[in-house]
Image (cartoon, rainbow, N blue to C red):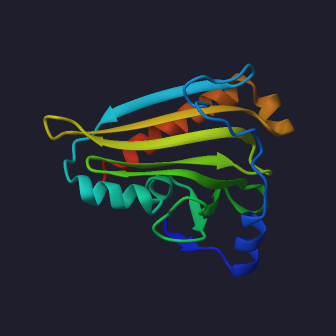
């Protein structure tokens, strides 16, 4: 899948949308009651940190995992909005988010996005790439979320399984240069 830019009207609508949860420091470290924590990582076979970081910061992880991605800017930065879609036609799941934090340090790159109103879940998800002391790369995804829509609430454990399935797809997607 490819990554494209949002049209100006859609970009403006998403930019003015509210987060669908209360953002607070340490949310990903200490989830509030009712929020589930997901934390998974993998050591990548690729070792090209700069290229892997570029892939991560241009939404290639989400696109390679099978989502249609439209964003307000490339590469992303704090405040970038994105709408991802999974599925086909009018039944496609709409996944709007805003980047709330970017990590750009020697040996560390990544970002956190928060869900916008209209996302089936409410919460944050962090995507972090780190160069280990031995030169290998670790890619870690941490998410804190709760169902925000009726279908997500009705999905219950099936919804959590779908989130873990997509997280594994994301983890594999960054290992493809």
Identify the residue at image location x=50%, y=38%.
Answer: 167
Residue 17 visible to the viewer? yes
Relative side of 47 to 141, left or right: left
x, y percentage for residue 177? 28, 57
In this rendered view, identify the residue nearer to me: 11 or 91.
Answer: 11
> Picture quarter containing residue 170?
top left
Residue at 61 percent of width and 28 percent of height:
161
| Residue occupying the far front of the picture | 25
Residue plotted at (44% across, 63% down): 58
Q: What is the total number of numbered labels drawn onto the structure image?
A: 0
Q: Where is residue 51 drawn, in percent x and y?
A: 27, 60
User: Relative to 57, does residue 44 appear above or below in the rendering?
Assistant: above
Q: Quick one: which residue is furthest to the bottom in this view?
A: 8
Residue 122 position within the rendered picture, expressed as x and y whole percent measured from the top left: 73, 39
Quarter occupied by residue 42: top left
Decide which of 46, 157 is in the foreground and name it.
Answer: 46
Seen as rendered, the residue at the extreme right is 150
Residue farthest toward the top in the current orientation of the protein: 33
Instruction: Please tell me whether residue 80 is drawn above or below residue 139 in the rendered image.
Output: below
Q: Residue at x 86, y 37 (%)?
A: 150
Residue 67: percent from left, percent from top: 56, 56
**109 to the left or right of 96:** left
Is residue 86 something one can see in this rendering? no
- Left-right relation of 77 to 114: left
Q: Nearer the viewer, residue 30 or 156?
A: 30
The relative height of residue 115 versus residue 74 in the rendered view (above or below) is above
């Amino acid at each position: 899948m490819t990554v494209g830019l949002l049209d100006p009207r859609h970009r403006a609508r998403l930019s003015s949308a509210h987060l669908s949860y209360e953002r607070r420091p340490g949310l990903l470290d200490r989830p509030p009651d009712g929020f589930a924590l997901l934390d998974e990582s993998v050591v990548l076979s690729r070792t090209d940190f700069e290229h892997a970081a570029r892939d991560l910061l241009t939404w290639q992880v989400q696109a390679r995992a099978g989502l249609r991605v439209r964003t307000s800017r490339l590469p992303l930065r704090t405040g970038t909005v994105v709408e991802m879609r999974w599925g086909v036609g009018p039944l496609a799941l709409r996944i709007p988010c805003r980047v709330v934090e970017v990590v750009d340090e020697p040996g560390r790159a990544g970002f956190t996005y928060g869900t916008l109103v209209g996302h089936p879940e409410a919460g944050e998800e962090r995507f972090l790439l780190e160069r280990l002391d031995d030169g290998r790369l670790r890619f870690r995804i941490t998410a804190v979320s709760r169902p925000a829509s009726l279908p997500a609430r009705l999905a219950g454990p099936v919804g959590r399984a779908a989130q873990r399935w997509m997280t594994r797809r994301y983890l594999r997607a960054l290992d493809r240069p």
